[in-house]
Amino acid sequence: MAKLSLHSAPPGSTESASTKHMHEVSKLPHDQITAEIVKGLGAPTEKFLSKLSDNWPKLRFGGFKIRDLVSGYTLVEVQDDEVDNGDTGTLSDEDDPSTRVIKYHLGPDFLRLRTVGLTLTFSNGPQPITKMEMVERHYFRGRVIRSYDFKFGFVIPGSTNSWEFIYDLPELSDAERLEIVNAPWEVKSDSFFFADGKLIIHNRAEYNYAPLDG
């Protein structure tokens, strides 16, 4: 169990500068994209920065859940059989990128939470991973609203692992929460997984914080 670090957007950053940087990063070969590079992104990517075939350790994700640490209530839970790792033939690098973007409808109460736990289950293939790192960045209308960085360390070959990440959510003003609630699917995120310094998996997601019965 560990706590992720939280970073705010770089002072003085602008949407145009962020977009320009994102375009430059998108042109790089995946093996030149580092964790430090994606930590500098100020806007969501427009395409996946790695291919499904770049996952050389054959890392596979199982289910995951998100819980509120104050109440212990489970907010989101996805079972193992609901996760598509691209090895069943249902996903392809040739697919329309929009079809591979994960969508979460979380509701407005999620924006008031202070600390949550993300439990992630994954299995590794036959090769060891000396060090693994996950970087996740959330954006809303040209600014970074959340940024997390977590280092896993050594991953045993052929192992199945369950990690819980404990992280604080940034405090939002009433005006900021209202703006996000009234803009469904405009909060976007990029999640990057690096194995031994190489980008192996890139997931993209969109979030809706409007009322769940809306």
Image (tube, rainbow, N blue to C red):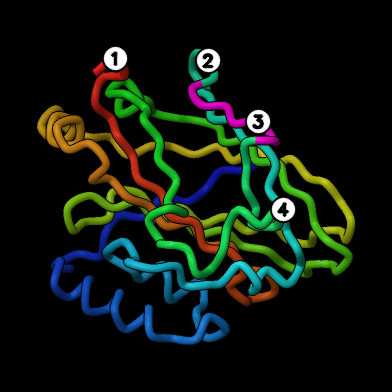
- Circle 1 SS class: loop
Front: mark 2 or 4: 4
Residue 100, horizontal then vertical, whole percent: 46, 54
For marks 2 and 1, the one nearer the N-term is 2
> In the rendered structure, are the residues bearing label 2 and label 4 in contact, judged by CB atoms less than 8 Å apart?
no
Q: 57 above or below 113?
A: below
**Mark 4 falls on what kind of element?**
strand
| Of 14 and 48, the residue lying toward us | 48
Q: Which residue is mark 1?
A: 213
Percent of width and height locating residue 172: 22, 35
Q: Which residues are magenta?
A: 75-81
Question: Toward the viewer: 47 or 114?
Answer: 47
Amino acid at pointer 3: Gln
| Quadrant location, the C terminus | top left
Disc 1 to disc 4, C-alpha distance = 33 Å
Q: Which residue is mark 3?
A: 79
Residue at 46 percent of width and 72 percent of height: 49
- Residue hosting label 2: 73
Q: Quadrant of residue 28?
A: bottom left
Q: Around disc 3, counting alpha carbons within 10 Å, would you say few (fewer than 14), some (14 to 19), or many (20 or more)?
A: few
The amino acid at mark 2 is Tyr
Q: Residue at x 22, y 71 (%)?
A: 18
- Viewed as shown, does residue 76 lie left or right of 55? left
Whole-Å distance between the Cαs marked 1 and 3?
A: 23 Å
Q: CA distance from mark 2 to mark 1?
A: 19 Å
